[in-house]
Amino acid sequence: MISNQETLKLSPFMAIYDIVVPKDNMLRQINELVDFNFILEELKTKYCLDNGRNAVSPIRMFKYLLLKSIYDLSDVDLVERSIYDMSFKYFLDMAPEDPVINPSSLTKFRKLRLQDVGLLDMLIGKTVEIALEKEIIKSKTIIVDATHTKA
């Protein structure tokens, strides 16, 4: 299973999140209340588990795209902000000192893993639905950048 690729984070700096990412931060609440394992289920056929090096977690890659959608950022700006924005790193399940991905990885993820045009929209929709159920998001409206969807 893809989730076996994840490793336990043993960083002496993890406690910094309790100081710099408030309990009422939207990203913190989404991360703590939404189970993103449905991403693994949806994308399990898109990964080869016995060939090559381990891929960046599909959950983390999806979370990058979710951040991109929420904050209306370009791939480059998103990755740059992920370097210093601790709420982003917390949301991405990264240790504070972990390196971020290369922006081109997002393009590759979209092209290779999200080939079905509606898949990203469906995954974002499911996440928003869960967040609404948990009352993390109050609004019934969310605007999604449709740059990468076909009309």
Image: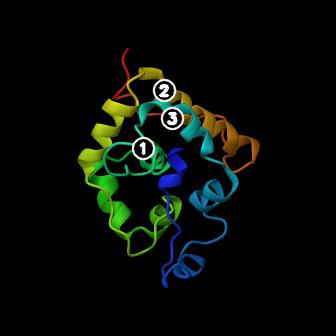
12 up-or-down from 79: above or below: below
From the top left corner, tell me how far across and down residue 70 is, in percent. 48, 46
Q: At 31% across and 31% down in the image, what residue appears?
A: 111
Q: Which residue occupies the extreme bottom position in the image?
A: 12
Secondary element under disc 2, as helix, strand or loop, is helix
Secondary element under disc 3, as helix, strand or loop, is helix
Mark 2 or mark 1: which is in front? 2
Q: Amino acid at mark 2?
A: Leu
Contact flag, marks 2 and 1 (Cβ < 8 Å): no
Location of residue 139 (image quadrant): top right
Where is mark 1, residue-wise? 65
From the top left corner, tell me how far across and down residue 133 is, in percent. 75, 41
Where is mark 3, residue-wise? 44
Mark 3 or mark 1: which is in front? 3
Q: At 57% across and 58% down in the image, what residue appears?
A: 27
Q: Which residue occupies the extreme top position in the image?
A: 151
Where is mark 2, residue-wise? 119
106 up-or-down from 54: above or below: above
- Lower sequence index among marks 2 and 3: 3
